Image (tube, helix red, strand yellow):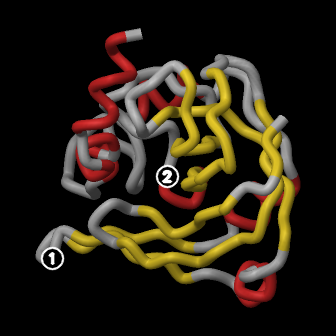
């Protein structure tokens, strides 16, 4: 799986390349090009109730600074530090078929160079031991951390205690 090894050297900002809110005719508000997003909407999604909560947060992109920001809801802020269980699709970040550092995404990934959704549809996960990569939905349990990495567009992180 040599393509996955590219993920180890690409910064997350490149993975979120299509998320800039530049005026492109086919692009949606912040996310992928509209036609890609429409096609992706037809694919399976993770249905964890946590995603519904995350989607209520408002994500924006500042063209001048090149940074993302998020306005999390009080409901999300109350989850910080508490264990959550969320399911989704695995995008490895450590360049291996067995990964312990990955993105968990609400949407089925369709391209490694474009985002699998907006930043409020992605959670960074650090697992206690490597898990085999799969294209199936996995479930992660662990405490939620609210992080503020506007450069990479990362705002949610789970130090997993369990991945199944």
Residue at the image position 52 percent from the left and 33 percent from the top: 91
**Between 142 and 80, which is closer to the camera in this rendering?**
142
Residue at point 55% right, 54% down? 124
Q: Earlier in the sequence, mark 1 or mark 2?
A: 1
Residue furthest to the front in view is: 129
Residue 75 position, x and y percent, is: 80, 83
Mark 1 — residue?
A: 65
Q: Residues within 10 Å of mark 1 (few under 14, many from 20)?
A: few
Secondary structure type for disc 1: loop
Name the outermost residue toward the left: 64
Q: Kindly identify the residue that appears in the image at 41 percent across and 55 percent down.
A: 29
Residue 2: x %, y % from top left? 33, 12
Identify the element where label 2 is drawn: loop
Which numbered marker is on residue 43?
none
The quarter of the picture where the C terminus appears is top right
Q: Which residue is labeled 2 in the image? A: 118
Question: Residue 68: x percent and y percent?
Answer: 34, 70
Residue drawn 62% across the image and 73% down it: 57
> Could you say which is closer to the camera, residue 153 or residue 158?
158
| Left or right, residue 160 beside residue 125 | right
Q: Where's the N terminus, which quadrant?
A: top left
Residue 89, by quadrant, is top right
């Amino acid at each position: 799986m040599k393509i996955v090894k590219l993920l180890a050297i690409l910064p997350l900002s490149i993975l979120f390349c299509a998320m800039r809110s530049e005026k492109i005719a086919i692009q949606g508000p912040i996310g992928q090009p509209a036609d890609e997003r429409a096609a992706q909407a037809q694919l399976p999604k993770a249905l964890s109730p946590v995603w519904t909560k995350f989607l209520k947060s408002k994500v924006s992109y500042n063209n001048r600074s090149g940074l993302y920001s998020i306005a999390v809801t009080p409901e999300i802020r109350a989850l910080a530090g508490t264990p959550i269980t969320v399911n989704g699709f695995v995008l490895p970040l450590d360049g291996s078929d067995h990964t312990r550092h990955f993105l968990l995404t609400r949407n089925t990934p369709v391209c490694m160079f474009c985002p699998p959704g907006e930043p409020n549809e992605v959670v960074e996960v650090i697992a206690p031991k490597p898990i085999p990569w799969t294209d199936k939905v996995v479930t992660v349990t662990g405490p939620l951390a609210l992080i503020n990495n506007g450069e990479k567009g990362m705002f949610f992180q789970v130090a997993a205690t369990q991945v199944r």
